Image: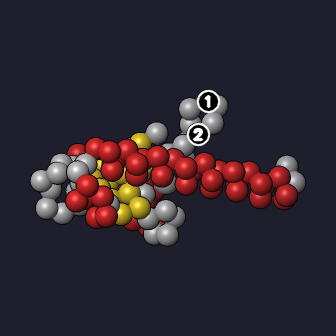
Amino acid sequence: MTSSQLSQNKDIQSQQGTAGEQFALAYEQRRLPGYLHEKIVRFGGQEIAVGYDILSFETPVSLLPDRYIEVKTFRGHPHFFWSEGEIAAARKYAGHYYLYL
């Protein structure tokens, strides 16, 4: 694989990841009432150290964001990479951590 092909693959993966996060964000906005929409946070690669992509709410009566969502996308055979930080966040937030494929 040439460096140009590698760069092109990274761009495609980034676009696919962004589309997946936007899809998950739209799902969360459909799932929750309108007054919570602006309080949902999508990190979008800005803060990769947190271990999740979207911070949302379990229920409409949640007082603080309490749903930690990691979004993964893939093409072809189902597969994805799960970083140590994402695994640590999954353990930390346990029943409130979601993996959206």
Q: Is residue 54 left or right of residue 23?
A: left
Quadrant hosting residue 92: bottom left
Q: Few, some or many C-alpha atoms within 10 Å of disc 1 (few <14, some 14-19, many ≥20)?
A: few
Residue picked out by circle 1: 77
**Nearer to me, 88 or 9:** 9
Contact, mark 1 vs mark 2 (Cβ under 8 Å): yes
Name the residue: 23% across, 45% down: 95
In the rendered structure, find residue 74 and report the number of the disc placed on it.
2
**Nearer to me, 25 or 78:** 25
In this view, the residue farthest toward the front is: 34
What whole-number distance in Å separates the C-alpha atoms at marks 1 and 2?
8 Å
Horizontal and vertical percent position of residue 90? 33, 51
In this view, the residue farthest toward the top is: 77
**Nearer to me, 81 or 100:** 100
The amino acid marked with disc number 2 is: Phe
Name the residue: 17% across, 51% down: 60
Q: Secondary structure at mark 1?
A: loop
Q: Is residue 92 visible?
A: no
